[in-house]
Amino acid sequence: MGEDMKALRKRIFAEVDLYPVTCRRLSAGRSDLEVLAAVIQGGSRIIQLREKELGGRDFYELALKFRELTANAEVLLIINDHLDIALAVEADGVHLGQEDLPLAAARRIAPDLLIGASSHSREEALAAERSGADYVNIGPLFPTGTKEIKTPLLGVGAIAAIAPHLTIPFTVMGGINGANIDAVVAAGARRVAVVTAVTQAPDMAAAVAELRRRINAPSPAFKRKRAGA
């Protein structure tokens, strides 16, 4: 049973393009549940519940609501940081930072969850893969207001510098928005994590749909090939 669930989660993750992440502080006065509804309406297959300022009980109650709604919509629910809450609400995965529970320990405790890991260098990304991560996030690429940046900004060049060395999927994050997403996709990213590009958009569902369209748009090289160039 566990193997079947893990395989299903991996299959859905393989279809992920836009990877929205919550942050109520940066959601223009809208609730996380409003953000979730827009993410589902816009067609995303995943959402990460990330609320650094919520206490454990409140986070758990919110995660329960997210689990009910995401399960009905067949959307993956990833919990940021809190492995215990991810297990308690039967989420699909957990995303761990460099200062969270060591990934190998998390893998022993939760073999059936998708486990993502933040990385800020090729060394960190490869270490996460060796420790059992199902995917790694590369970032931050650009300046971002979602957290205090303690590491250098990587820029889109990090995608080419890190991704070819990985054998697991990767996401990218950090200040990605409508102004730079085309450059991120052109550099090789296919799973793009965003916060404010969705949460601060006037029409969040439309923003999700448009960002997804741009991630999946044929590359200029592909367009030239089809045109016979």
Image (tube, rainbow, N blue to C red):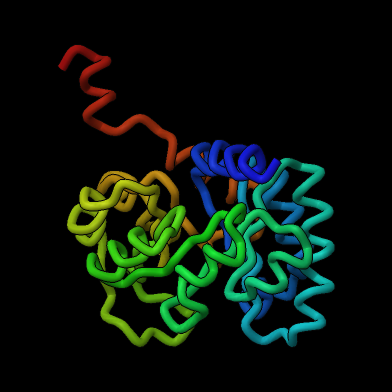
Q: Is residue 203 visible?
A: no
Question: Residue 152 placed where, x, y %?
Answer: 26, 80
The residue lying at 42 percent from left, 69 percent from top is 118
Q: Residue 74's image quarter?
A: top right
Residue 9 horizontal side relative to residue 223, left or right: right
Question: Residue 26 placed where, x, y %?
Answer: 61, 76
Quadrant showing the C terminus = top left
| Of 170 and 37, the residue lying toward us | 170
Residue sitting at the far top: 228
The residue lying at 72 percent from left, 84 percent from top is 54
Q: Residue 214's image quarter?
A: top left
Residue 139 horizontal side relative to residue 155, left or right: right
Residue 144 horizontal side relative to residue 142, left or right: right
Question: Residue 190 placed where, x, y %?
Answer: 39, 44
Quadrant showing the N terminus = top right
The residue lying at 23 percent from left, 58 percent from top is 162
Q: Please give the count of numbered marks on the rendered protein.
A: 0
Residue 206 horizontal side relative to residue 115, left or right: right
Q: Residue 85's image quarter?
A: bottom right
Q: Is residue 220 above or below residue 160?
A: above
Q: Is residue 92 visible?
A: yes
Question: Residue 140 placed where, x, y %?
Answer: 36, 71
The residue lying at 44 percent from left, 87 percent from top is 148
